[in-house]
Amino acid sequence: MNKKILIVEDDIHISNIIKMNLNIVNYATTEVYDGLAALEAIERETFDLILLDVMIPKIDGFELMSKIQRHRIPVIFLTAKNSVYDKVTGLKLGADDYMVKPFEAIELLARIETVLRRYGKEESMMQFQDVQVNIDKREVTIHSQPVELTPKEYDLLVVLLKNKNIALSREQFLDKVWGGDYFGETRTVDMHIKSLRKKLHLQENIKTIYKIGYRLED
């Protein structure tokens, strides 16, 4: 079942952009535009995570955070405020992370993934067409038949799956799979992508994005 995320953001344009990016990677989303509506939604539904703007009408983000602590839902604050005081206040209230607008969609997705993993809410199984990935066992199968991947090929596949329909640069793949201290050539990404396409029969699905990198798409 897709993870449910509540977006609490009074700027409709920003909220819609966040929703679009989350839906692309298969999160289920609900949008509300003020603190009172958020409180009502939280009392009415179950959410796996809340993206919460601080400066929202009726009940601001900090006050709302105080009111919903008993629900024990992970919260990431999204705000234009960049003062140390605001960050400390949000974290002391129990927020799990704090992002200052504007931010890149890929960073937001990474933060969400980290928080969900911390709470044990991350999906243990992932599937794309006939390819199934068992995250806990680090196993990949096609039609229940095991596929042998190297550790880096496996990590690269998981990054592609978690960012489906999003174009990632070779540098981003290097950072996520090989680590920020890797100083090798970006050509190693191309070699691993080529191998994944062949082993998983995804030649038509792992798209080369000219002058950028790669994207997994249906």
Image: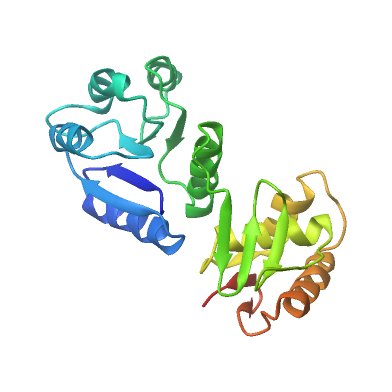
Percent across and percent down for residue 49 are: 38, 38
Compared across the picture, whether 204 is left or right of 51 comes to: right
Compared across the picture, whether 170 is left or right of 24 comes to: right
Compared across the picture, whether 81 is left or right of 204 comes to: left
Q: Is residue 132 above or below residue 86?
A: below
Q: How many marks?
A: 0
Percent across and percent down for residue 14 are: 30, 52
Depth check: give the residue in front, 21 or 5: 5
Percent across and percent down for residue 101 are: 40, 42
Looking at the image, which residue sits at the far right? 184
Q: Work out whether residue 82 can be spotted.
A: yes
Q: Is residue 175 above or below residue 141?
A: above
Q: Is residue 74 above or below residue 143?
A: above
Percent across and percent down for residue 63 are: 23, 20
Q: Quadrant of residue 28?
A: bottom left
Depth check: give the residue in front, 161 or 10: 161
Looking at the image, which residue sits at the far front? 144
Residue at the location (65% across, 54% down)? 134
